[in-house]
Image (cartoon, grey):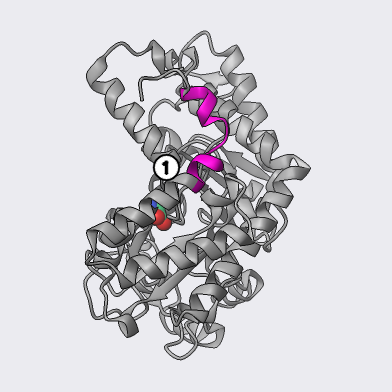
Amino acid sequence: MINIIKDQEVLRFIAEESKRQIDELELIASENYVSPAVLAALATPLVNKYSEGYPGHRYYGGNHLIDEIENLAIERAKQLFQAEHVNIQPLSGSPANLAVYLALLQPGDTVLSLRLDHGGHLSHGHPVNISGRLFNFVHYEVDPQTGCLNMDQIRKIAKEVRPKLIIAGFSAYSREIDWAGFQDIASEVGAFTLADISHTAGLIAGGQLINPTPLFDVVTTTTHKTLRGPRGAIIMCQEKLAKKIDQAVFPGLQGGPHDNVTAAKAIALGEALEPSFKKYAHQVIVNAQFLAKKLQEKGYTIVSGGTDNHLMVIDLRPQQITGREAEIALEKAGLSVSRSTIPGDSRPPFNPSGLRLGTAAVTTRGFKEQEMEQIANWFDQALNKRDSKPALAEIKQQVSTLGRRLPPPQYNQIYATTAY
Ligand code: DSN
């Protein structure tokens, strides 16, 4: 496919990155490998079209087929998440959340959400993000003893600050979320509810975690994490909020949707409706739990003591390694991870005290418990021998052998004829 590109300078980087994705193991919790069909849809002439507006109500001609694609994606998302209304156009997760705020709030309104260093997200009101500058965010935290959410504590804060919106759904929290508990609190204080399921959408779609969509007012999700679609997002909401949400996305925030991405979203949502996706989602969690257990056996501390989903946050303070040092050593060993804050971290986000690992991507490659054990061994060896270049290179070689045996889906065929 990429052989069509004759610009050697760009082609070289694309080919090298494609090779890296085969040879290294992707343990970044927010990443995944799309199917060849999703990949192919992104490189179609749909990229040429402008479609500002919504199906049946566009500001440009020639959109009757784009309307069909957008409606198909919407219907699939509705079916997958039991949603009353779906907006498929958000360009990514942060703009999707901003659109929800624009739809439901006035500048200065109070919103309750989880602190970033406790597992929340920048777009959930961090002061450096537009969300934190426009609205009055108040944050709840995880319990310092358990690393888990304490619903009584959240209720207490909600009653004190009377937020207009309560956000649940996180970027670095490994436990099942009490959606009904959040909804109860919101009903008690008269707040809207937003579930940001960007990380766990695929596990919810695959029936492995509780679905907040029928309960919550609004649900946002990116489409490219556990859901295994293209980069982008969707917003789902109750019918009564449909008009406000749609107007906030367009014309409130965005211009024309990216129609090639809409087609890729429709394909990914169709794949997630297949029975095989349930098996995939199940294995993602089995793998995460197995990896967490193996790492604990080697003396690593998992925040909250384990995981119910695809990710885990490792507190590296006992090992006296910073998250950044660990990330660099692991990258030299062919293991791609992201550093992460731990709850109440005394270190800054650029060089925090922890790491976040996820199993969504490696499970797409067909990894099971056996490979998870191998990853735990390599992880431990790489951190212990982080000062030895030859040791890290030796691990990288072994990682690449496994990577070649279980490559991302059909990447070998797609890139088979390229120079490397
Ligand atoms: N970058 C995503 C993550 O890693 O969780 C969220 O924006």
For this orientation, the residue located farthest to the top is 62
Between 311 and 49, the one lying in front of the other is: 311
Task: Say whether residue 341 is visible.
Answer: yes
Q: Residue 241: x, y in percent?
A: 58, 48
Q: Is residue 416 above or below residue 320?
A: above
Q: Amino acid at mark 1?
A: Asp
Bounds of the magenta segment: 402-415
Task: Say whether residue 171 is visible.
Answer: no
Q: Is residue 191 above or below residue 16?
A: below
Q: How many marks overall?
A: 1
Residue at 40% x, 70% y: name it. 380
Helix, strand or loop at disc 1?
A: helix
Residue annotated with mark 1:
23
Q: Is residue 378 above or below residue 261?
A: below
Q: Main secondary structure of the magenta part?
A: helix
Q: Is residue 260 magenta?
A: no
Instruction: Choose top left, top right, bottom left or bottom right for residue 134.
Output: bottom left
Ligand number 1: quarter of image? bottom left
Callout 1 crowding tier (Cα within 10 Å): few <14, some 14–19, many ≥20 = many
